[in-house]
Image (spheres, rainbow, N blue to C red):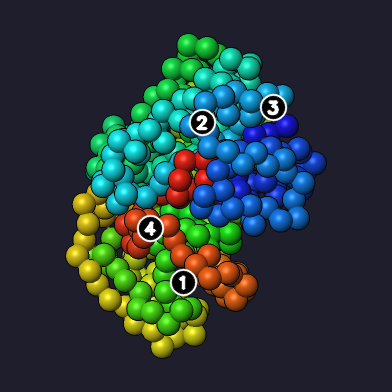
Amino acid sequence: MYLVTGGAGFIGASLVRALEARGDRVRVLDSGRAAGARYLTGTAAEIVPADIAEPGIAAAAVKGVDAIVHLAARTSVPASMEAPLADLRDNVLAAVTVLDAARVEGVQRFVFASSNATVGLMAPPAREDILPRPVSPYGAAKLAFEGYLQAYHHGYGMTTTALRFSNAYGPYSLHKGSVVATFIRECLEGRPLVIHGDGDQTRDLVHVDDLVALMLLALDAPAGLVGGEVFQAGTGKETTVRELAETVLELCGGGGRIEHLPARRGDVLRNVSAISKARDMLGYMPRVELRQGLAQTVAWFREALRDAAPGEASAPAGDPDRGSDAASGSDAVSGSD
């Protein structure tokens, strides 16, 4: 059995379906604050509606599982700038609670959804051997937990693996405040697409299906190959935020406009990953072309917005990363990656 924390939302919902499609049993630990359980409709997943930060929850959730994928997190870079201690609590302390519960229970395999935000200031592309210089509390928190993964691998013999996600997009992201989700919502609702900064900042936009494929590779690889390792998880291709906005406008039917607001603290100007390590060691190869993936995502949003209850399509307050988001993730601890 696999435990997926934050598994009721964006990336988690796709991972759960992929695991079940190959015959695996899945337990999902998710607070439900961001997306509820609607994205898991039709799955057979065992859903534990709780917050990993609650006493005793993690210890109960890890019982009987063979491996853990930790997606639950607080992922807004701007929110981390406003409330760094809350980010520390959810992205480090709560995560270590799950990791240590796994150690006590004897769960050996632990895959973590990290972020390119750990790298921060660097000359692109981001590589695993670059000295990290995070520019936001969010990036610092993700980096801190990577350190705990190293300690639990070398100190306790656990097979821990960190995947540094680039900017993820795709279905099941109606609740997200990521740049792609925000642009699509704005466009389909007839609002201007708002870019913080001049739009020349770049993002490595990776479809959720490609990230799911990489997570499965990390779960299935020999322990000696992935234990204590960090892998960049993107496409290796840069897209400017302005180009992204223009493509979304075109795919939505045109007629919209772009507005610019001042750049914000904590924003990374260029974000692109070198994926050669994941390719060479795990056989990872992203397959979804950007325009194809965006078209699919726009179509999914059209249907989801049509069926959404009032207020259901809004990103959580304080989470609009519009053009500055440094990675994928969830909006509240144990909620909806």
Q: Which labelled disc corresponds to residue 54? A: 2
| Mark 3 vs mark 4, CA separation in Å | 34 Å
- Of all residues, the one furthest to the right in this rendering is 23
Quarter containing the N terminus: top right
**Discs 4/1, front:** 4
The earlier-in-sequence mark between 2 and 3 is 2
| Mark 2 vs mark 1, CA separation in Å | 33 Å
| Mark 4 vs mark 1, CA separation in Å | 15 Å
| Residue at position x 22%, y 69% in the image | 261
Q: Which labelled disc corresponds to residue 332? A: none
> SS at mark 2?
loop
The earlier-in-sequence mark between 4 and 2 is 2
Look at mark 3 in the image and give the residue it sits on: 65
Three-letter amino acid code of the residue under disc 1:
Arg
Query: Along the horizontal axis of the image, is 150 left or right of 174?
Result: left
Q: Are marks 2 and 3 in contact (CB under 8 Å)?
A: no
| Residue at position x 58%, y 59% in the image | 172
Look at mark 1 in the image and give the residue it sits on: 185
| Residue at position x 35%, y 39% in the image | 87
Q: Which labelled disc corresponds to residue 317? A: 4
The earlier-in-sequence mark between 1 and 3 is 3
> SS at mark 4?
loop
Query: Along the horizontal axis of the image, is 337 left or right of 19?
Result: left
The earlier-in-sequence mark between 2 and 1 is 2
Q: Residues within 10 Å of mark 3 (few under 14, many from 20)?
A: some
Q: Are marks 4 and 1 in contact (CB under 8 Å)?
A: no
- Of all residues, the one furthest to the bottom in this rendering is 255
**Discs 3/4, front:** 4
- Of all residues, the one furthest to the top in this rendering is 155
